[in-house]
Image: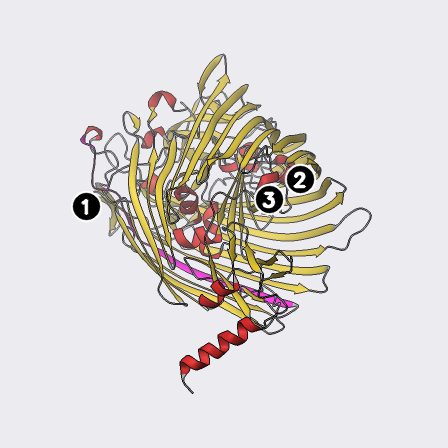
Amino acid sequence: MNPTLITALAGLLLFAGPVTAQKLIVAEETTGRPLPLSTVTTLPSGQHRITNDFGVADLTGFGTGDSLLIRHVGYHPVRTTWGDLNAGGFVVRMKIDPFQMDEVVVSASRFSQTQDGTSRKVTVITGNEIGFRSPQTTADLLQNSGEAFVQKSQAGGGSPVLRGFEANKILLMVDGIRMNTAIYRGGHLQNILTVDPASLAKAEVLYGPGSVQYGSDALGGVIHLFTPDPVLSTTGRLLVTGEGSLRYSSVNTEKTVHGSVTIGSVSLASYTSATRSDFGDLRQGGNRNPAYGDWGKRTFTVQRFGSADSAVRQSDPNLQSPIGYTQYDLVQKILYRQSDEISHLLNLQYSTSTDIPRYDRLTETGSNGKPKSAEWYYGPQDRFLGAYTGQLTTPTPVSDLIRLTGYLQKLEESRHNRNFGSAKLNHRTESVTVLGLTLDASKQLGTHSIGFGFDFSADDVQSRANQENILTGATVPLDTRYPQGGSTQTSAAGWISDTWQIQSGLTATAGARATLTTLKADFGDTTFFPFPYSTLDQRSFAVTGQTGISWLPADGWKVTGSLSSGFRAPNVDDAAKVFESVPGSVLVPNPDLKPEYSLTGEAGLTGQIFPGLKLDLTGYYTRYTQALTTRPGTFNGQDSIWYDGKLSQVTTQVNGNSGYVYGGTGSLTAGLSDRLQFFSVLTYTYGRLKTGGKTVPLDHIPPVYGKTGLTFLATEFRTEVYALYNGWKHLKDYNPSGEDNLVYASRYGTPAWWTLNGRVSWQATRILTVQASAENWFDQNYRVFASGIGAPGRNFSLSLKAQF
């Protein structure tokens, strides 16, 4: 039979009857990925379907005379007719909508809610955005968003800063579980690198205190990372999906291979992810400003010839070496749905690396011009997480949802250093075991959504150390970083919150948490340092609260205001760190530390000035009290002591009088056409510490920073051209004794910088996606504030991704 005749008969049958058995596929426009949980509604009859795991909706029973409205959170709704569907092969591709305010977030309340009901600023980096940006590390993902500042001391580093708070003053979460441990320090951290960006479903950043929701440490905000959950089949047949990717980057010869697979039946599902990344030495930009001389040049490396160290001149001063390392990441999740109301989830994660050179320390030279260190590296950074989550959604008089999570985390990190010309290699290793339990529950009472819960965690810290003679192999005991006899820190807390839907478009929130924290440390052998105390025992109790309001005065507009308090109980690193050498100083323990507190007022305005133009403004002021800060101190009456072979100034952590931070973030998004979009975001932060009758700059305060660019979207194609930029950080704005790393700045401070960058993604086939990027087009030489390493120079990256 003639094929044209067959097509005509099929079309006649399709439109002749009142109903059809046709199936509709809903997919994302640029990637072609299916969009599960899309709603398909007939107009005006109001029948609806929801797409399954494959983005498919069965339209059986739908009248062919109706039009259809297709919706998915974060995408432009599509209104279509049966004729248009037939012409398009019953495939609908949806475009991302950057103007929607009904995006689902979790971090603001511990439960899923839409953005239009939150009174706090929350940034969401979706799975689509993560896939498009294809970052080397999770720290790079945050930095390239333009809405977070990231400091680096080495290539295997990345310490996020939120509203002037960093390290143990912001909280890292993964899948609802705290990553912060009792040894998170106040300087700069790289622990976020132990979460693989290729295995992220999304990332949320909650700005400002999050202590009501999550407890201690959330002074500046919460970075919440979510790995994909296993997907159950909704079709009755086995669901099998997966993806694999390869990426190469020129600037550090990065080579990453990643694979993941999801297998799901009606009641049992599994998600597995594995990634290996190799990072080589990093080349910084070659286009230098002559005003800064040789700042940042790598003119030598230390090599060992026989039994002697030698500083060898490096021919390429822009190649930062040694700096490379390899990282491995594994995620395994298993979901069992016992019934429609009961589910069980097992979550296993493991991350490890090879040794990571501490590049900033390897660049330091003494007064004689010789290198200070011959070796300085972190040992493998191991993180294991095992967690069980049980969830019950059966309504009871006290709850509609109960979620219980028990978890075990084991972490190990180590530091290894040897002075130039010395045969003595120091090894210091820390092991942390964390046991935790959280209970979250929610109940809808009329227009009130009540949330409440309890959480408990216990950290056990063990430190060991020895000194190795690399010539003879002999080892001798060495002073440990933390108390030799071990340390424990526990936290027990209860919390409650209320989200009140006062009327349509007007929502009020309030909440409170009470937390009891204990810390015990045994200094054990005092051979190395005769402390006037042998044990440390601290106990603190903190009550924090939060209130806010969200008002939607008109379609596309939102006005918010909130007042929230946060606290951070001193941890083992604050109160009991035995000794840590930092450039020119040593830090001694202080057993009398108290918790530090913050109180933040925040106001926000979001609105579509006219269709296609969205403005988002947020301003805040934070009062910071009992602030922990580093000050000069004494040990046994001396202000300087010999440590690791050099005379070092004694410093200690103290509760400063008070401080304040204020600033704001503004963003503008403009749809220049159906395909072309302009975006820009800018953040300003200012902070000061009032102590000893003086006002000095608060450390960790970044210069002004932002991102501006253009995005072009088309079917199976997306490209972005953007600029990243930082303002000046002048010497007068550096903290004189904190963690701003003045030693790694130029003689003027940290200069302003900007880079021009671009990336493109092409859905070549249904299975294959090709991505390419070019970063720092003009090979600018620059350094991010407080960093001890030059930023990447011109970089070309190529990624191949396959999905099934």
Residue type at mark 1: give it: Asp
- Report if residue 332 lies within the magenta region: no
Q: Looking at the figure, which quarter contains the N terminus?
A: bottom left
Mark 1 vs 2, N-terminal side = 1
Q: Label 3, secondary structure: give it.
A: strand
Disc ID at residue 223: none
Mark 1 Cα-neighbour bin, 10 Å: few <14, some 14–19, many ≥20: few
Q: Is residue 577 above or below residue 274?
A: above
Q: Which residues are magenta?
A: 268-290
C-alpha span from label 1 to label 2: 51 Å
Depth check: 510 or 74 in front? Answer: 74
Q: Is residue 619 above or below residue 426?
A: above
Residue at image position (61%, 66%) is 62
Residue type at mark 3: give it: Thr
Q: Residue 344 location, x and y as percent? A: 67, 60
Q: Residue 406 location, x and y as percent? A: 67, 52
From this viewpoint, is residue 348 visible?
no
